Amino acid sequence: MIDFFKSVYLNKRFFYVAGALVFGFFISYFFPFLFLSMKAGVVLLGTFTLLDIGMLYRSKTGFFARRVLTQRFSNGDYNNVRIEMENRYSFATTLEIIDEVPVQFQQRNLLFDLNLNARSDKTIEYLLRPTERGEYWFGALNIYVLSPFQLIKRRYRFDEERQVSVYPSYIQMKKYELMAISNRLNEMGIKKIRRLGHTTEFEQIKPYVRGDDYRTVNWNATARTNQLMVNQFTDEKAQNVYSVIDKSRNMKMPFHEMMLLDYAINTSLVISNIAIHKHDKAGLITFAEKIHQGLPADNKATQMNVILETLFNQTTRFPESDFERLYVFIKRKITQRSLIMIYTNFESVSSMRRQLPFLRKIASNHLLVVIFFENTELKHLITSQPRNSEEVYMKAIGENFVSEKRQIVMELERNGVNAVLSAPENLTVNALNKYLEIKSRGLI
């Protein structure tokens, strides 16, 4: 009985009819002949309400629904949620669907209205975009079922307390992986970079065909086979590619509801996957005031799962990053010349110069790429037309910040450090372009 009272609700139509009857009784005070009609209306309302209850509750399982979603969500991407419904009643129903999505989405008006024929099924879909990693909890899937009279509605609850873990953007990782396999990375904005010279890793000797570089002719093989033969080279493999992620307060800045740290994590996942796909070894280092994780570079089959789980657990730290500790760690742990891509953020030239001695020391032993972020909001500020003296002052400050970012790039490159200044939304494309450029030029 308690379950019955918890699941039965009066619909708006019931209140409309009841309100009309109340108004009719008021009018009947002045027109007595209407009084009997109003009493008959009350009896009819009660009768149809009981019929409505009987139709909705004569079966314990008159309706079934379930929420279908993956065990993992991809951070920063739109993830599909599907609701499958089956009407087991012998009459058509009107449905009100309320899904209790995790509190992180702050969606309190996720309501769907639809009609479903007798003994039929239907599926609806909607999208959710998480902007932070972690565990998300879905509540109940509430379905309010109305009979053709629509005086009463019955609530069904399904799929209560469902947990989903939000991981770094594996959807983006798979997308770039498929593009790399099919040689269509240029469709994602990846530049085609002209290969300079030859890499030193020999692949095979093959017959000469029109267009081959005559400088690769193998004269010994040509003499033996009496046919023009050339050496074929391939990209050097098994090179170490380290993604180094700064977790200090500099990376806590939000952009499009995501922190800069999350953009760096998503890009590191893509770079690591493409590196392993190109037979290189991918490693990972995270640091702030100390070294938090140091995953050695490897290309074994389980490496990407280890990197994904490691990135899932990263959070920003409030202390300032210690590049001296980073240099000491790299000096001790990474003995082979490697490509080291540091994701950090410098807001001023002075903050970069404090870390420059350690960056130069790292660059003396490895190929170092420092990737940091441009503040795209400043672009809107400096391109807008100022309307008063305060806005002129703010525009001048914005232009100074933009100029400092460009100065940081030039000063890093003058000191032998490769630098990439990128908007957060273009970080993956720009970092991947830099990695492919380095590979094509055989710099490591």
Image (cartoon, rainbow, N blue to C red):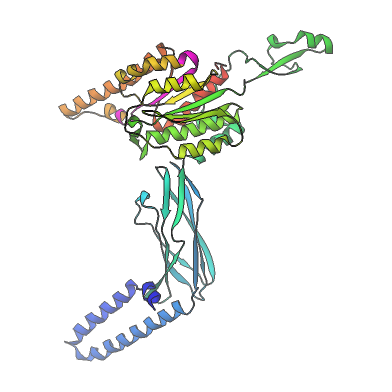
The spot of residue 307 in percent (x, y) is 51, 35
Q: Which picture quadrant has residue 398?
A: top left
Q: 94 or 152: nearer the eye?
A: 152
Residue 363: x and y, percent? Answer: 46, 15
Please indicate whether residue 54 sits to the left or right of residue 305 in the image: left
Residue 368, image x and y in percent?
A: 47, 19
Q: Name the residue at 23% across, 23% down.
A: 396
Residue farthest toward the front in the current orientation of the protein: 332
Q: Is residue 176 above or below residue 419?
A: below
Tell me if I can see residue 377 in this picture: yes
Q: Which residues are magenta?
A: 363-378
Residue 107 or residue 162, whichever sits in front: 162
Residue closer to the observer: 275 or 221: 275
On screen, residue 2 versus residue 30, left or right, reads: right
Number of disc labels: 0
Magenta span contains residue 80:
no
Instruction: Return the x and y of residue 189 as percentages of the image width and height.
Output: 50, 29
Is residue 14 placed above or below 64 in the rendered structure? below
| Residue lying at 45% horizontally and 53% vertically, measured from the top left | 163
Q: What residue is drawn where x is 36% and y is 19%? A: 355
Q: Quadrant of the C terminus?
A: top right
**Quarter of the rendering occupied by the N terminus:** bottom left
- 303 on left or right of 361: right
Position of residue 85 relative to residue 177, above or below, is: below
**Was residue 375 drawn as part of the magenta stretch in this picture?**
yes
Residue 172: in sight, yes or no? no
Q: Does residue 348 appear to the left or right of 242 in the view shown? A: left
State the residue in front, 284 or 214. Answer: 284
